[in-house]
Amino acid sequence: MKITFIRPNMSDMRSVDAMEPLVFAILAGLTPPDMETVLFDERLEVIPYDEPTDLVALTVEAAAMANVPLAGTNWVPGREAGRG
């Protein structure tokens, strides 16, 4: 089984010095050794969406999600209706 960990980029810019998210190191350490794991950090590289995998795990920082609307809506949690 292959598990692909993805850290999406929340901006249009690429970084040259981004650190690997700690959560992926923890998850990789807890993954049984007979399972393959791979990490793609979109802040640093393009994600190869055509690469075969069995399971995908995504993470983002809570602060980065502060202005992201709820899926399928224009509503941003914590923001008053009609503002922003």
Image (cartoon, rainbow, N blue to C red):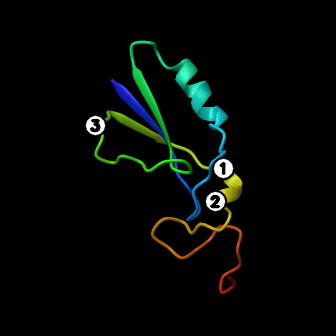
The answer to whether the residues at label 1 and label 2 have Cβ atoms under 8 Å apart is: yes
Residue 29 spot, x, y in % from top left = 57, 19
Task: Look at the numbered disc 1 and give the secondary structure of its residue.
Answer: loop
Cα–Cα gap, marks 1 and 2: 7 Å
Q: Is residue 81 above or below residue 16?
A: below
Q: Is residue 73 left or right of residue 63?
A: left
Mark 3 Cα shell of 10 Å, populated few (<14), some (14-19), many (≥20): few
Residue flagged by tag 1: what amino acid is it? Answer: Glu
Task: Look at the numbered disc 3 and give the secondary structure of its residue.
Answer: loop
Q: Which mark is residue 33?
A: none
Q: Which mark is residue 65?
A: 2
Residue 48 spot, x, y in % from top left = 36, 46
Residue flagged by tag 3: what amino acid is it? Answer: Pro
Residue matched to label 3? 52
Tell me which label, 2 or 3, sits earlier in the chain: 3
Residue matched to label 1? 61
Cα–Cα gap, marks 2 and 3: 28 Å
Closer to the eye: label 2 or 3: 3
